[in-house]
Image (cartoon, grey):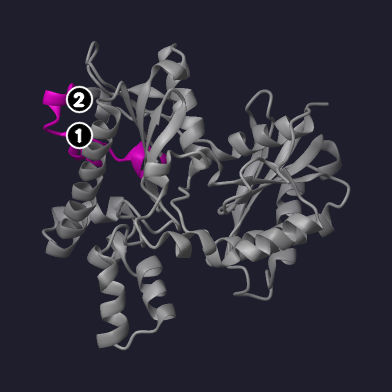
Amino acid sequence: MTSSVLVLNSGSSSVKYSVVEPDSGATVADGIVERIGDSADVPDHGAALDVVFAALAEDGHHLDALGLVAVGHRVVHGGPDLYRPTAVDDDLIARLKELAPLAPLHNPPAILGIEVARKALPDLPHIAVFDTAFFHDLPAAAATYAIDSEIAERWHIRRYGFHGTSHQYVSEQAAEFLGVPAASLRQIVLHLGNGASASAIVGGRPVETSMGLTPMEGLVMGTRSGDVDPGILTYLFREAGMSVEDIETMLNRRSGVRGLGGEIDFRVLHQRIAAGEAAAQLAYDVYIHRLRKYIGAYLAVLGGADVITFTAGVGENDALVRRDALSGLGAFGIEIDEHLNDSPGRAARRISPEGAPTTVLVVPTNEELAIARACAGVLGGGHGDR
C-alpha cells in the first residue's frame, strides 16, 4: 500500500485538506470545508473534520484504505524556537498557545484544528510544519528591527517571514526546472496570492523576505495593507479614537486591494479597470508599485538575479501582473516574452526570452506536498524541535 499523509490547514472558519503521497507527489484527494460555525451542519471544527472524512469516503477514499502514516498541520507562526517539523504532543500544544499573540488570527484556529484532529485520529502521529521555518536563519541585518533591543528581546520581536514552505518549495523547483544546483543561484520568489510575500534567496538560503513579525508587513495583499508608516497606527489611536482591535482589523481585513478598490478577485478588478473605475485602477497601481519596489530592493540585496519566479494564485494565473511587475527592467537583464507570458499552463514554465540574462519562471506552488514530505522526513528518522 502506498503511504500518504493527510495535510490539514485549519482557519477560523475553514479547513483545507489534502491527502498526498510524499514519494510520488500525487494528490489523492483535496478539498475545503467552509463557513464553520455559520450553520447547524458545520457548527465547529470537530464537525468540519467529520465532513472531511465523509467527503473522502464519498469519493471512495476510506481512511483505513488510504495508507495514512501521519497528519501534517500547517502552523503559521513558530516563534523564535520552533522551526523544524515537530511531532505534536501536549507540550507542543502548550508552547503554541504561548505563541498565539504573535499570530492572533492564524495560530489559535491551527491549534484548535490540531486538537480536534488528534482526538479524531489518535493512532496517527501528528506533525506541525511552520510557515516561519524557512526564514529562521535570516541574516541578523535582515531579521532585526531598529527598535529598543531590550524590548525586542523580551517580547521576541524580529522579522520571522511567512509562506516559508512555499518559498522553499518553489525555489527548489525552479532550480530543478533549470537543471542547476540551487546552491549556484540568486533567486527572487514572488508568492502572490490573497496573502503575498517576496523573498531573496542565495545558494538555497533566504537572505531577505517581505513579511515580518506578522504576515501584515511587505507587499500589498488582498485584504492586508503591507507596509505602512507605524505613525499611522498611533495617529488613528489618538486622533480617530480607534481601538487597537479596530486598527488591527482594518489593516488585516479592510485594507490592501479590497480596501482601495473594493474587490479581492483580480479577474474582477481587471474588469472594473477596463470599465474605467478609478478606484480599481488605483488599487492595481499601488499593488504593482509596491511589488516593483521590492523587486528592485532585492536586486540590490542580491547584486542581480539569476531567476525570478512567480507563484500562487495571482502569480501563476495573472499575466498582466507579471508583465507590469517586470516591465522596463531590460537594463537589469530582465525581460518577458509576451507570447510565453500570455500562454496559460499548469506546469512550471519559462516566460522570459531564450538566452535572457535573468530567467523568469512561473512555478506552481504545492505547500501541501512540501508539508507531506516534511512529515515523511520526521518519520524517516528526522527529528522534531524541542
Is 147 positioned to the left or the right of 104 in the image?
A: left
Residue indicated by mark 1: 326
Query: Dot 2 lies on which element?
Result: loop
- Which badge, 1 or 2, is on the more N-terminal residue? 1
The x and y percentages for residue 5 are 73, 38
Q: Magenta segment, principal secondary structure? A: helix
The region drawn magenta spans 312-337
Residue at point 45%, 57% (across, down): 213
- Give the residue type at disc 1: Leu
Residue at point 26%, 79% (across, down): 235
Is 326 positioned to the left or the right of 194 in the image?
A: left
Residue at point 72%, 32% (across, down): 376
Q: Are marks 1 and 2 in contact (CB under 8 Å)?
A: yes
Residue at point 36%, 56% (across, down): 217
Q: Residues within 10 Å of mark 1 (few under 14, many from 20)?
A: some
Is 379 positioned to the left or the right of 229 in the image?
A: right
